[in-house]
Image (cartoon, rainbow, N blue to C red):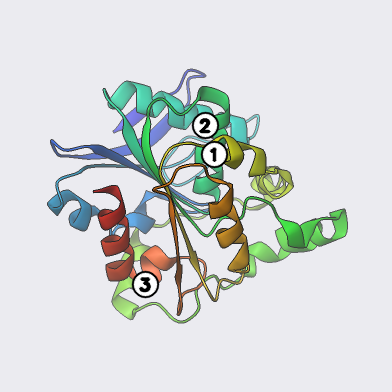
Amino acid sequence: MKFLTSDNLALQVTDYGGIGPSIIFVNGYSASEATWLLQIVAFQEAGFRVITYDHRNHGLSEKDSSGATLEKLARDLSELCNKLVSDQVILIGHSMGAAVILEDEKLFGQEKIKAVVTEDQAPYFEHTRNSQEQEKFITNFPHQHLTAGQLPDDLKRELGKKLLPFDFKNNRDLLSEIIGTDFRPILREEIVPHLFLAGEKSPIFPPDVTLAARDLNQNQHSKVHLFPNCGHIPHLESPTEFNALVLDFIK
C-alpha cells in the first residue's frame, strides 16, 4: 500500500498483519523493504504484526525532489507509527535505519516505543572525522562489499528480483549527514530496552563501537550481541541466529 506523508510524498508500506504487538522494520541506506524477507515469516509465526516500508528516495517510495534528510526520514517513521499503530511499537533498524530510529527518539520522544533493536550502526563515525575521509567513504560506499562472505545463491536471486536501483549520486548528502551526526547524546537519554547487534567482521564499523553504544543506554534490560562470522548485514548473513536473538529479546 501507499502511505502519504505530511509533505505529500507517497511511501511504499507493507503491513503483513497479525494481532500481536507491532514491529516496524527500518531499512538501511540504499536498501528497501525486500531486505527483510527472511524475517517476515519468523516474526509473524511468533505472534507479531510485521510492517516494512521503503524510505523516501528508496525502493518503491516516491522521490523527494528537495532531497532526503535524516529529519525527514525520522518524521516519516513517526507518522507511520502514529497512523498504523495504536499502542507502543517495536522498532528494528539496520544501519541507517538505526540512525533514523534514534533521530525519531530525539525529535518525537520515546513514549510510543516499546523496544528498539539496532544492527551495525555506530553512535559516531570515529573513522571519518575529517572531510577527506568522509569523501572517500561516500565515494567508495556504492562499491563496498558489505557481507563477510557470499550470500546463498537462492537468496541473492530472490533479492535481485525485488531490489531496485538506487541513486547514490543524488543521495550523497543524506549519507554525509548520517556520517556527520553524533548520536551519543540521544543514546545517553534513551531509557527504552535496546538490543545492539553487529557483525564482528563488519567492513563499516569495528565491533567495539557497538559495545560502547550499549554502555550509553540507561535501561537495565538492554543487551549487546556480536555475530562472529558476519559483516554489515547479520539479518541476511545469519538469519536464524538473528531472528532467535531478537525474538528472545523482545518477548
Point 50% across, 55% down: residue: 165
Mark closer to the observer (1, 3): 1
Corner quadrant of residue 164: bottom left
Q: Nearer the viewer, residue 228 or 32?
A: 228
Who's the residue at 42% across and 67% down the image?
A: 234
238 over 128 or under it: above or below = below
- Answer with left or right where residue 205 lies relative to residue 229: right
Q: Camera-side residue: 141 or 183? A: 183
- Disc 1 packing (10 Å; few <14; some 14–19; many ≥20): many
Asked if the residues shown at circle 3 and circle 2 are in contact, with their CB atoms under 8 angstroms apart, the answer is no
Query: At which x and y percent is residue 1?
Result: 28, 33
In the image, is residue 147 above or below residue 46?
A: below
Residue ID for mark 3: 156
Q: Is residue 12 left or right of residue 251?
A: right
Real-space CA distance between mark 2 and mark 1, rounded to the nearest whole angstrom: 5 Å
Q: Answer yes or no: do the residues labelled 2 and 1 have beta carbons within 8 Å? A: yes
Q: Give left or right: position of 232 versus 222.
A: right
x, y percent for residue 181 = 70, 43
For residue 105, the mark is: 2
Answer with mark 3 or mark 2, whichever residue precedes in sequence: 2
**SS at mark 3 in the image:** helix
Q: Amino acid at mark 1?
A: Leu
Mark 1 secondary-structure assignment:
helix
What residue is disc 1 on?
102
Total numbered circles: 3
Residue type marked 3: Lys
- The residues tagged by marks 1 and 3 sit, at their Cα atoms, a distance apart of 30 Å
Mark 3 or mark 1, which is nearer the start of the sequence? 1
